[in-house]
Image: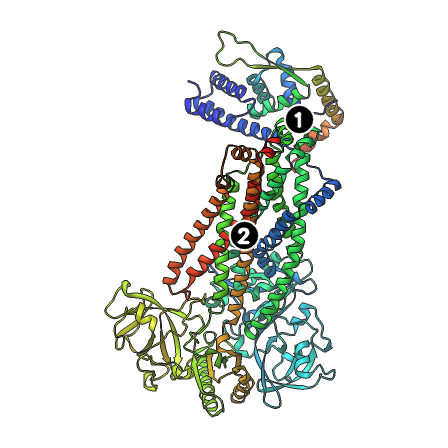
Amino acid sequence: VKANRLLRWLASVLVRGPHAADVLADLDQAIERDLERGRSVQRARWRYFTNALTSALTLGSERLRRAARRLPRFGFSLIDVKLAVRMLVKHPGLTLVAVFALALGIPTALFPFQMINIFSTPLPFEDGSRIVGLRHRVVGEFEALRGSLHEYQTWRESLGSFDQLGAASSSMFNIIADDGRAEPWRGAHMSASAFGIVRVSPVLGRSLVAADELPGAPDVVVISHRLWQSVLGGDPAALGKQIRVRDARHTVVGVMPEGFLFPVNDDLWLPLRAEAAETQPGNGPSLWIFGRLSEGVSEKRALDEMTAVENGLDETFPDVYASLRPEIVPFTFLITNELEGTMWVFLPFQIIAVALLAVACGNVGTLVLARTAARSGEVAVRTALGASRARIVSQLFVESLVLAMLATGIGLALAELVADQFARGAASTWSGEMSLPFWLDFGPNRRTVAQALALAAFSAVIAGVLPALKATKRDIQGNLQRASVSRSGIRFGRATTALIVVEVALGVGCLFASTTGWRLVPRVYAPASEIASHEYLSARLRVGDRPLGALSPAQQEATLGRMAFVQGELLRRLAAEPGVRGVALAGTLPGEPHEAVGVEVEGAPGTAGLRWVKRATVAVGFFDGLGVPILNGRDFAISDVPARDQPSTAVIVNSAFVERVLHGGNPIGRLVRYRRDEPLEPGPWLEIVGVVPDLGMLDADGMADYAGLYYPALPGALDPVKLAIHLGAEPTGFAPRLRAIAAEIDPAAILEKPVPLSEIMSADRHLIGWLVFGVSVIAGVAVLLSIASLYALMSFTVAQRTHEIGIRTTLGAEAGDIMAVIARRALLQLATGILIAVTTCVTLLVWATGEGLRLEDWNVNLAASAGAVLLIGLLACIAPTRRGLRIRPMDAMRV
Amino acid sequence: VESLGSFEQLLLFAVLELGEGAYGVRIRERLESTTGRTVSFGAIYTALARLEERGLVKSWQGVAVTEQRGRPPKYYKVTPTGARALLAAYKAIQSAATGLVPELTRLAESKR
């Protein structure tokens, strides 16, 4: 009874290394002696097993330790750097290609990191990282809530972990000049304490004080530097002057320093006053609540205190607080609320970006390898003279590190430039309610630089150390011999081949994507050409302070009543305005992303008949206002909309709906209904009364025109409502007049983004433009690198096979045969890469155009991209081929 | 004089004690009986190999004896250098402990 076979096999597998035989023999002996001493078989076997396992671990780690000791010791010196710089100057072509590739590759790889950096930087105030946000999260859900007045008051009274607590809510305010011109500015109702929390003092006058918050206190306002410049002309005597904010005159009591736009991008600050009813839990405006952690108090301790307070709240107001859990976050997360949870989406991009960089580095590595191959004689001589392998590897590493550092410097400068351009564009496209927080700085910061340096080191390892290890692997004798015949023992292996194929495919794919992208940019988020969209002024009109969903039923009723009045009055006045040819009102305008609804067509019941289509709610007269013909049936009539709470039964569909959902036939009179999730009953049957052309019912990506239906609404049923006013050329000139009219009707009504209808989604188009720009950069790098690698591969082939070519020529080979010898492999790689790219693109595009992508002529683009890469690839082959053809048999024989 | 870790000291004492019969299984049994802890063969051979590299022990392969089964064991012996190192280590700990044992015992036995 010894160790059974399984145990011994296990031990022999586990225990490896120089002492393995001794250990295994001893294990066998030990189990025998254990049994002799009266230990049970099980016990002895257990001891055998644990002993084998721990022996394996010890022997394994010992082997690792010894292996680590054998690793080459890398040493750097200034002379390496000097040699590296000399080498870069000596091979300007390689330097240029490599620096270009890395200078674009490193910032590209940094981009996702940068997104995270941007959103996690602290506020740019004294000790800004100690300013934190307080909020609730719904237990078990992903949703974070803004605070209420009740929470603000409770926390302010009971929490000792904070120096001060503050609260703010941001919205749009009309500032109305004496001549009636109205201009919307973003401003905040903010507690006086907030100014103390951020520790910023006004440049003129005072900030808000607690007395301003009392009911009945005089109306005062603190304004931003740029509002002071723009509205008051920078008047040093501005204090005490009055400006009209919405319907009331406010006295200016202070001007904040330039660049202070706290909490988001706000230009005026009004005291936060609470009405009694609004301080009930779950009522009142939604607020950002924030505070500065007291000296020496950790976030954790503050959260513990909050949790203790929360237990009291849970008991007193279980229906509001029981399902909530308090949390403390960096202040910036309050504003970028939704973004914080979605940070992980950058992770795959990060992985892809770094992988792309690795491919680029691999390619630079190929080039470096080719150059190192040319220097293998030098390497051999140095080795023979006593240089260790580590010494040579570290010199080659320093060379690529210098290259990568140079590229990183250029790359960061480029990134700064691009970020600057992007920020400028962003500031003009995202304004008002959509404006970006003032603290967002897109440029590289200290963290970015650190990450860039890490990536540079990473690049240098891939591009320098791996080829260097490969180049120094050969024995000295062999290399010395080869050095004497000016040939190298280095070969381009399978990895290099794969790399070139991938690079060519990537080049074609990205070139196609970027050329197509540039053609798509003007077409995305655009209303269909049926509408003369550049002749229309579009704008968003809103009367409520907050979204309808955030209001109580009574407040909703009041808001919608006001909206109905404002809309009716606006339509009446616009009709009387000279130059206005028509007005269309809708919840969503053509060219914008539309909401999706599930519908079922009568006669095709069950889930088979369920189709997802787009929906827009439009006012009666919408199509007329846009100058769109009714292709079939009739337009909506006032009689289609009985009352606000009574649903209409008429819908109008677009051509795509007739084609893709109804599959042709006469659509008039057919019935459709909304389908909701299973337990809910389907909606009532709706009758199709008309068909209109496809006007641009888009999805979030803005590319495809979808099947959709239009649903009629009464004036005042929508807040906000979108306007499209037909004016003719230069529609934006009408914007000030439109603002004045709206402010006259209701001083609190906010009119936002008055832009031509063709520009309604310019912000998103702007983003797509940047995306295409990024793809173009990658395309450039990919094409350049693949070409450079092909060139290197061929030059290398010619150099290596000089001898062979010479013999072939002697034996009477024709020029064609020689060309085949030289170019076969490169051409094969080129063709494979292009074929892979074309197949992938065709498959994707056939699918995408079937889904409604507005891109009919992609095949031309694809052929052009593939052709371009093929042509450049062939051009790269010319010089090495000619060099090969020029080889004279005598020259080849001489070496 | 070479410095020694505590495991190495215990190992050298065990080899010394076993005299001519110091090989893996015996050494392990000796260590287990003096320290009360289980020790793996892997740890023993690793430590012995290091000691041998430093010239503190020497080893030789045993001869196969007919009645023994399996591979003949590898025997170990402490070298004079090893003995000097062990003696130095022992003296060092002894002189450090001089007069402190009662205090140490009292402290170790006290409750807190």
- The answer for which chain carries disc 1 is B
- Say which residue label 1 marks: B6
Say how the picture is coloured. Answer: rainbow
Three-letter code, disc 2: Ala
Label 2 vs label 1, nearer the camera: 2
The percent coordinates of residue A746 (x first, y second) are 52, 87
In the picture, measured across the screen, residue A259 lies left or right of residue A539, that is right
Residue at x 55%, y 79% (from the top left corner): A275
| Residue A610 vertical placement versus A749 (above, below) | above
Circle number at residue A782: 2
Q: Secondary structure at mark 1?
A: helix
| Residue A347 vertical placement versus A393 (above, below) | below
In the picture, measured across the screen, residue A468 lies left or right of residue A609, that is right
Alpha carbons under labels 2 and 1: distance apart: 60 Å
Q: Is residue A895 visible?
A: no
Q: Is residue A668 visible?
A: yes
Q: Secondary structure at mark 2?
A: helix
Closest to the observer, A196 or A828:
A828
Labels 2 & 1 near each other (Cβ < 8 A) = no
The percent coordinates of residue A831 (x first, y second) are 46, 47
Closest to the observer, A728 or A336:
A728
The percent coordinates of residue A792 (x first, y second) are 57, 44
Three-letter code, disc 1: Ser
